[in-house]
Image (cartoon, rainbow, N blue to C red):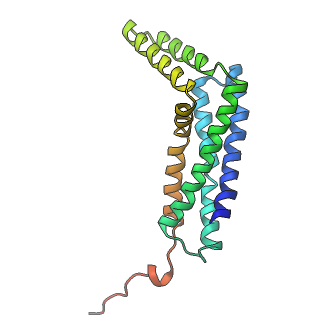
Amino acid sequence: MKRIVLVFGLISGAITSIMMFLTMPLIQRGTVNFDNGEVVGYTSILLSFLVLFPAIRSYRENVGGGTITFGRAFSVGILITVISCLFYVASWQVISHTMWPNFADNYAAHVTAKARARGASAEEMAKTQKEMQDMKKMLADPVKSAAMIFLEPFPVGLIVTLVASGILRKRDDAIGSPLPERVA
């Protein structure tokens, strides 16, 4: 299991990191705006987790002898998800400290301008500005920042893991065969 988890975790993590390093400069330059950047980002995350299907299938065929339980499939998938999420966090830390150190300020300005453009009241503007100040403080703390960044891709990986585990589970015919029909 270790080899399959490691290989596919590295593949998923590499896809996540490469896509992040390719899209961040586009967002910085304004080619892709923050709102579209979320769509691009989550699409990239989803694509990186699609490797869970061949990973679980590979485990089923090569390690499980053609069978795999939902629990074992889930274990393989969630371990790969964690590895990929760690790549995501590491990539973000590199980007936010080298390529885009003023991300929090840029994002806060974007959210504030968007609220102002939609005609937010003074109370709503104050709330938005407070939320942005809180976000900046959290991103300044490396532990809180890493935890928050980890939680961006993790739910997507969890959902894909659940789906892949359900689809690819395959029990031994002797265990999973239906009961014989009753003859009256």
Relative vertical location of residue 23 with respect to residue 106 in this rendering, above or below: below
Relative vertical location of residue 138 with respect to residue 177 in this rendering, above or below: above
**83 or 165, which is in the foreground?**
83
Q: Position of residue 146 (x, y in %)?
A: 57, 35
Quarter holding residue 106: top right
Residue furthest bottom in the image: 184
Task: Tell me which residue sits at (62%, 68%) in the image.
Answer: 59
Q: Position of residue 170 (x, y in %)?
A: 52, 72
Q: In which quarter of the image is the C terminus?
A: bottom left
Residue furthest left in the image: 184
Q: In which quarter of the image is the N terminus?
A: bottom right
- Figure disc tally: 0
Q: Where is residue 120 in the image (x, y as percent from the top left)?
A: 42, 11
Task: Tell me which residue sits at (68%, 63%) in the image.
Answer: 3
Task: Tell me which residue sits at (53%, 52%) in the image.
Answer: 160
Task: Tell me which residue sits at (68%, 37%) in the image.
Answer: 91
